Amino acid sequence: MKNKKAIIFGAAGFIGNHLVARLKAEGYWVRGVDLVSPKYQLSEADEFLLGDLRDASFVASCITEGIDELYQLAADMGGAGYVFTGENDANIMHNSALINLHSLELALKWKVKKIFFASSACIYPKHNQEDALAPICAEDSAYPAMPDSEYGWEKLFSERLYEAYRKNYGLVCKIARFHNIYGPQSVYEGGKEKAPAAICRKVALAKEGEQIEVWGTGQQTRSFLFIEDCLDAIRLFMDKDGFYGPINIGSTEMISINDLTKMVIALSGKSLGIKNIAGPVGVNGRSSDNALIERELKWSTQYQLAKGMQVLYHWIEDQLNKQK
């Protein structure tokens, strides 16, 4: 039996590069596509195409005949400092929408058998996430829609786009809403890093007795999912016939950002304090509701937060030591 063929858009990114490795380990032939090469670890893809997915002609060179699966992870995105300031809204919406429009047109032309679209927990209504201890993020709570950012609005529009292509043209499109995926190879500096990596970097660089700056009150809560658990969920989802989502892929282990910082400080063995400062924070609370994924895919998390954060902290510490 010949190897299945997969294309991964956003293959240089944190999740994308890990997904390339997972599919290769499963025996796939993989074409990776991105604007840049992976930053921290060489891609294992059989082919890696460098180019701009906002360009329809480039997308046409990437999606060709005989592709079994397309994983569309590419987006203009970043952490709170990039998404919630409002300064990048036009780029976020324009760039990501173009990528999804082009991806679907070419997938339709060449009859790609299955498509995975990476949506986001940012699609959930802001008013359902005011209570830091009891956010509402069940899949069916997405409407009436009121995401907290333009990033969330674009993801919601693109969900509807993928659903429309499935309904009108029969494309098998599967939609997953990621909730704060973290782990080694994630961006940890430069302005687009997310909270776990940013905190690990700050703690690793701090000297004894210093204070770690945390945006907002630090009482805002999130759940974080380790990359290996995320990959398991993606693969189970793609193999489940007749189930298209949208589905949450995340953890139910909720923690405040101050407590996450304390966890990383403890991992470091340093004596450090916390200083809460003004900064973009997003909603007060967000955690994955896993009732649907547990029922449909029989999936559950294997990595507790403390275990995963230990892996991430030591990886970032090693990266910073290499820079020295």
Image (cartoon, helix red, strand yellow):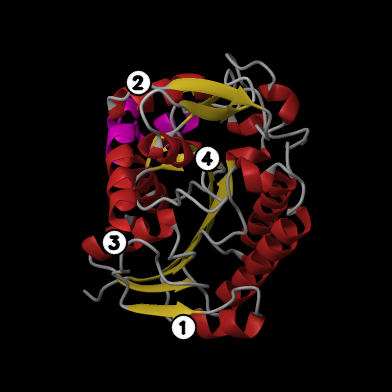
Query: Which of the 4 image quadrants contains residue 204?
Result: top left
Q: Check disc 4 and give the amino acid type.
A: Ile
Q: Which residue is mark 2?
A: 271
Is 310 inside the magenta-drawn segment? yes
Label 3 neighbourhood size at 10 Å, few (<14), some (14-19), many (20+)? some
Which residue bears the numbered disc 1? 65
Which residue lies at the image location 53% right of the left edge and 54% below the top edge?
Answer: 190
- Three-letter code, disc 3: Ala
Of residues 28 and 39, the one nearer the viewer is 39
The mark lying in front, picked from 3 and 2, is 2
Q: CA–CA distance between discs 1 and 2?
A: 58 Å
Mark 4 and mark 2 in contact (Cβ < 8 Å)?
Answer: no
In the rendered image, which quarter is residue 310 located in? Answer: top left
Residue name at image x 73 percent, y 54 percent: 88
From which residue to which does the magenta span run?
A: 291-311
Q: Earlier in the sequence, mark 1 or mark 2?
A: 1
